[in-house]
Structures are given as structure tokens and as C-alpha cells.
Image: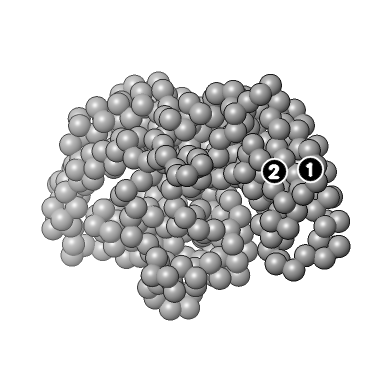
Amino acid sequence: MDSLIAASARALAVGDALGALQRVALRDDPPALALRGIAMAQLGEHPRARELLRRAARGFGAHEALARARCVVAEAEVALAMRDIQGSPRALAAAAATLEAHADRANALQARLIAVRRLMLLGRLAEAGAALTSLDALEARGLPPSLAAVAELTAAELALRSLRMAPARSALARAQEAAGRARVPALQAEVAQARAALDRPAARRLMAGGEQALRLDEVAALLASDALVVDACRRGLGAGAAWRPLARRPVLFALALALAENWPGDVDREALILCAFRTRRPDETHRARLRVEMGRLRALVKALAQIEATPRGFVLKPRDERAVIVLAPPIAGDQASLVALLSDGAAWSTSALALALGASQRTVQRALAELEAEGRVRAIGRARARRWLAPPLVEFTTILLLPAALPIG
């Protein structure tokens, strides 16, 4: 490694992208291309960074598998920053295996952490948790402080998405300490932003005559209580350790939410038909369908509550005289999960949003068009290059809207 390459690498390690570029900007050999690509990524020029890293990977010979693997890992991180999550993870897994075979433990862990972060973007938390546990990243010793901070941040985000507050706070404290040792401003800012999310409202508790803003730890306490909680953030209901997900059953969730919002009173059949089937002119077919859906909801929640018919409609009666609590998202509207994804400040393609939400591209396009008409999102580029942006949401945190892909519209 020549002196300019070494100096450029040291500059990148401390976050000095401009200093790194000054040393290798006019060079086109593979090591210089790789360093230029990483520097451009740190400056936010992701398309150019990806191009340079691909050129670098092609430039390394067959006997330079380690260098090529490092380029693959760097390109995967750029793809993650660009929210390009459609590609196969096989190349990244192969690169990680190559790095491990060459005893490059730090870059191998970086590759595995990128894979975990991709899984979290896709809402696949169980897989992300299993992958993170298998890494044993948090017990590692001798890692560079910057990589240790990223590992702790990843663990903290996973804990927050699962509402495990104590592990999340511990991981954030370790991330802050590691970021301080790394002395990389961007990393320190990311840790500070994650810690600030703990003190921002994460949900609204709907009550008669008003609502109450709740922080993440308050939400976690409610979900762990004996109350019957109907959670409109994660689309489900539960009490204590029992949880019934309804994200994939929107009609049942709409009925459960309507019953919970009117508890302890009942809800008339016409109102239930309106909220579940979105029609203002019900006929006998709608009433018959309502009876069928109510039967399904009864069977699903029978361990938590009874649903009884009344002369005018239906009423929710929790077992063991539990209270009923309704949690609503901090963002109003049917596209809350979509806005939550866009609020990270990154530019998302329609296809990436559809993949993360588990929805069709047509559904996402309709939702984006509505949000654009309301001025809540904006588009840049055209056709296949079109990307979507939204202003960051600094008044509250959207962490509860991201645990899994939720249906929109």
C-alpha cells in the first residue's frame, strides 16, 4: 500500500472524506477507486459512490478476493443508504464469508450488520434478531470504535422496534461511548438522534373527550399491563403477554378498533358496516357479512374478550374486568406507515417502499399521489429514476409504525 492510499484510508477512518479525496482524486487504480467511492458515499453522493465501487471491484484481479469482497460490502452499504433493498443478499453473504476466511473480522462483521439492517428495513424483525444474536457482535472485543457504535446502534434499534426498553437504553449508552471514542461527527449525531427518540411522543392514547401523548416507555408499560390494548400503530390487540396481530386482516381490525373506541358502550350495525366496509348504504348482504366477520373476530379474541350482540349492534366486554385502551399513531391518516418510512430523510423508490410495506406498487403509488397532493411528500427524478422524500418528523418518533410491514390505504 503506497503512502497516499494509506493516508486516504486514515482520513476516511476518522470521517474526513474531503481529505481522503484530495489524496486520490486523480487516480484510477482499483484501491484509489475504492477509497474515492467510500469518500463519495460519506459525502452523500451515493450513485457516484456505487459506480466507483463497482469499477474498483472489477479492477481487482482474481487473486485479490479480499479486496473485491471489501468493495462488495461498501457497495452494499451504499445500496442500503439509497434504500435499494430489492437485490439478492447472496453477494453480501459471500463477501462476508470471504472476509471471515481471510481473518478480516471487522469487515465481515460490517457485512453481517448491513444484512441485519436490511432485514429491519423490510420489517423482518425475527430474522434480524436471530442474525444479530448469531453474530455475538456486542460481546466482541478489539473492534474499531466506529464499528462497535454501529453494532450497538443496530442492537438498540432492534430492541426499540420490539419495545424492549431496558436493553435499548443499555445499547444506546454503549453506542454513545463508542461513538465518542470514534470521534466521527456523523456517527455521534446518529446516536444522539436515536437517544432523542426515547423522549419524543410515539403514540396517542385516545380517551373520551381527548387524547394523551405517550413516549415509548409509557407505551411499553401499557402493553405489558393487564389492560386490553387495541394498538392502531402495530395493528393488533393484546393484554399482557397475549398478542393477536391483525395487520393482515384489516376488516377485523377496523371492527375491533370501533368497538374499543366506543367501550363500554355498544356500536350500532350501520356504523360498524361503514368503518369496516366503507359503504353508507348497507343492505342485507352487508349485514350478513358483518355477522360473519364478527364471528371471526369473536373466535380470534375469545381468550381476551367477549363480543356480544345488543339490540342495536355489538359491544366489547373484556374478560376479568380489564380496562380497554386505544393506541393511535402519532401521524393521522391511513398512510401513517408510509410516511414513517419516508421520514428517515432518505430518497425511496416506489418499488423499495412496496417491498418494505408488503404492498403492491400500484397501492403504494396511489398512496404517494394522495400524500403528494397534500404536500406531505415530494418526488425527484422521472420514470425509473423517480425517488420520494418527506421532511423529517422531529416532533415525535415513528418507531412504532415500523415493526412490521403494515397494509396501507
- Relative to 400, does residue 407 appear above or below in the rendering? below
Return the x and y of residue 23 as percentages of the image width and height.
14, 55
Circles 1 and 2: CB atoms closer than 8 Å: yes
Q: Secondary structure at mark 2?
A: loop
Q: Which quadrant is home to the C terminus?
A: bottom right
Labels in figure, total: 2
Return the x and y of residue 167 as percentages of the image width and height.
42, 24
Name the residue furthest bottom: 382
- Give the labeled residue for mark 1: 310
Q: Residues within 10 Å of mark 2 (few under 14, many from 20)?
A: many
Between 235 and 18, the one lying in front of the other is 235
At label 1, the amino acid type is Thr
Q: Secondary structure at mark 1?
A: loop
Give the Cα distance between marks 1 and 2.
Answer: 7 Å
Look at the image and name its color scheme: one colour
Q: Residues within 10 Å of mark 1 (few under 14, many from 20)?
A: few
Between 379 and 91, the one lying in front of the other is 379
Return the x and y of residue 140 as percentages of the image width and height.
38, 23
Give the quadrant of residue 375: bottom left
- Give the labeled residue for mark 2: 266
Return the x and y of residue 391 as percentages of the image width and height.
33, 60
Residue at point 32%, 48% (across, down): 395
Give the quadrant of residue 30: bottom left
